[in-house]
Amino acid sequence: MAERKSRGGARSEQEEQQDQLLDKGLMMDLAAVDKTHGSNPIHCLTIVGQVEGHTSLPASTKSTKYEQVIPLLVAIEEDPDIKGLLIILNTVGGDVEAGLAIAELISGMKKPTASLVLGGGHSIGIPLAVSAKRSFIVPTATMTVHPVRHSGTLLGVPQTMRHFDRMQERITGFICNHSGISEERFHQLLMTTGELVMDVGTVLDGEQAVAEGLIDEMGSLGSAMHYLNSMINRSKKR
């Protein structure tokens, strides 16, 4: 991430223009806003399309690249000028290991974090949504709960099925440890039949996701920003 000029003295017009260019570059390359300009600077990170893992997706596919997001999260945690993180999700899911890696980093941050699900927070987007200290969802958003799937060639041996079972256990464990849903209920949602075409699983709208304990509360941008600002102000008082 490009380094900002010092805020210690008066800023020239050229420095202000450079900051604007940095903001524009971040929005275009990483779908991120370096800092909001309110009393508590908050970094906004969007996770959109597919979460890209070790294999590059076609250029026509909207994706979130984990090799860009991971160092960005480290920089956010270490930047004293950034007081909180807002994660906005509209994702169809993607690579399991990449999604869990990002989710683990977010859950381990000391700064206030909030997630907001807009449109969709499907599949591996669920761990990403619950990784924040507080999660929000709009009424029109949906979240698809389904077992781990694989689109490549598989060996038809018991070890393959055990590998998928262990991978699902990792995902389920993370979700249940960072939300209010029980493992038993989450497994029921995973294995529901008759709701998804050619698959098992459940589609939850915003209200259902909150009722199941998967997401903390209904709300939109104002709710998430209010939570972040209140947590930041509380930490300032301490």
Image (cartoon, grey):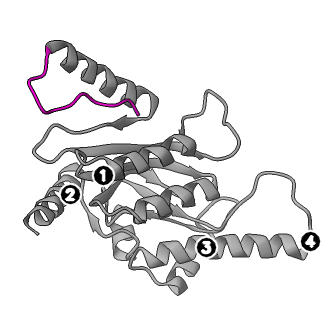
Residue position marked by numbered label 3 in the rendering? 170
Q: Earlier in the sequence, mark 2 or mark 3?
A: 3
Whether residue 133 is situated above or below residue 22 in the rendered picture: below
Instruction: Name the residue type under label 4.
Output: Val
Mark 3, mark 1: which one is toward the viewer? Answer: 1
Looking at the rendered structure, which numbered label has been put on residue 228?
2
Q: Earlier in the sequence, mark 2 or mark 1?
A: 1
Packing grade of label 3 (10 A; few <14, some 14-19, many >=20) is few
Q: Is residue 222 magenta?
A: no
Q: Earlier in the sequence, mark 4 or mark 2?
A: 4
Residue at x-position 30% and y-position 46%: 79
Between the C-alphas of marks 4 and 3, the distance is 21 Å
Between the C-alphas of marks 4 and 1, the distance is 43 Å
Between the C-alphas of marks 4 and 2, the distance is 48 Å
Mark 4 in CB contact with mark 2 (< 8 angstroms) = no
Residue at x-position 15% and y-position 48%: 40
